[in-house]
Amino acid sequence: DTGVSQNPRHKITKRGQNVTFRCDPISEHNRLYWYRQTLGQGPEFLTYFQNEAQLEKSRLLSDRFSAERPKGSFSTLEIQRTEQGDSAMYLCASSLTPSVDNEQFFGPGTRLTVL
Amino acid sequence: QKEVEQNSGPLSVPEGAIASLNCTYSDRGSQSFFWYRQYSGKSPELIMSIYSNGDKEDGRFTAQLNKASQYVSLLIRDSQPSDSATYLCAVDPQTGANNLFFGTGTRLTVIP
C-alpha cells in the first residue's frame, strides 16, 4: 500500500516564474486536499476535490493559483507569477468519503522557495 | 472564524514521563478531532483521531475529548526521545469541504 506522493519535493524558483506541483493520492481515496504551511504555523486549507470536481477554494487561493484533478486521480497545483510570499511547504492530503472519520493522510510535501 | 488553540510550548519532559498536550476549539459544531505529529522538515503524520467524548487509547497515546468544554488533549505515556516533534491538533468542523483547521502546534522535546 503506497501512501500519498508529491513531486517535486523541493523547488527553487525566481520571482515571476510559474511552478507546477503534482500529487498522487492513496489509490482508493476520492477526496484530495491541498494545504499550505509556513514556518511555525499549522497547515492552511487551499482547495479540495471530490473525484475530479473542485468543490471549494479558500480565500487564500489567489487568482495566480490553479488546481486540477482531470481524471479524479492525481492532481496538479500551479502557481503563476510566483511571489516571495508564496514560499512555503505545499501539502497534499487524501481521504475516503463517505466515512465516519474523514481521516486525512498527508504526502511528504513540496517545499517551494521563491528567490 | 474557526479557531484552534494549542498551548504554546515548547514542552520538555524527561524520558519515561507523561507528556500532556492540550487544544481548544471555537466551533461548537465540530465533530471530528485529530492529532498529527510533525518532525522538523517533514509532513504531518496522523497518530490519533477521536469523535466521542471520553478517552481513546492507542498504545502509549491517549486522546481525550470533552465537547462541552470544547477541549481535546493528547497524553503520551513513557515518553521517548523519538517522540520529540511538533504535535498539531486538527479539527473537522463538518462543513461541506471537511477541510481541517489546525492549531499552530506544540513542540515537544523528550530529554534522555
Image (cartoon, coloured by chain):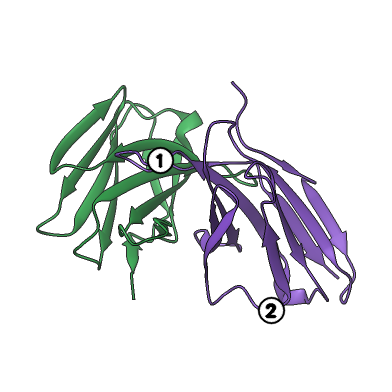
Chain colours: A purple, B green
Q: Which mark is residue A56?
A: none
Q: CA distance from mark 2 to mark 1?
A: 29 Å
Residue for point 19% across, 64% down: B28
Residue with the mark numbered 2: A63
Query: Residue A34 at what x, y percent from top left?
Result: 59, 56
Residue for point 36% across, 40% down: B13
Give the chain of mark 1.
A
Residue for point 9% across, 58% down: B68
| Label 1 secondary element | loop
Q: Which of the 4 image quadrants contains residue B30?
A: bottom left
Give the chain of mark 2.
A
Residue A3, compared with residue B104, is above or below; it is above
Q: Is residue A13 left or right of residue A101?
A: right
Query: Residue B81 at what x, y percent from top left?
Result: 48, 30
Q: Pointer 1: residues within 10 angstroms few (<14), some, or many (20+)?
A: many
Q: Is residue A81 left or right of residue B5?
A: right
Camera-side residue: A37 or A59?
A: A59
Observer able to see residue B89: yes
Q: Which of the 4 image quadrants contains residue B76?
A: top left
Observer able to see residue B44: no
Report if the CB atoms under discs 2 and 1 are less than 8 Å apart. Answer: no
Mark 2 or 1: the one toward you: 2
Query: Residue B101 at what x, y percent from top left?
Result: 40, 60
Query: Residue B73 at what x, y percent from top left?
Result: 25, 47
Quadrant the N terminus of chain B occupies: bottom left
Q: Earlier in the sequence, mark 2 or mark 1?
A: 2
The amino acid beneath tag 2 is Asp
Residue with the mark numbered 1: A103
| Label 2 secondary element | loop
Residue for point 60% across, 61% down: A36
Q: Is residue B51 left or right of residue B78?
A: left
Q: Pointer 2: residues within 10 angstroms few (<14), some, or many (20+)?
A: few
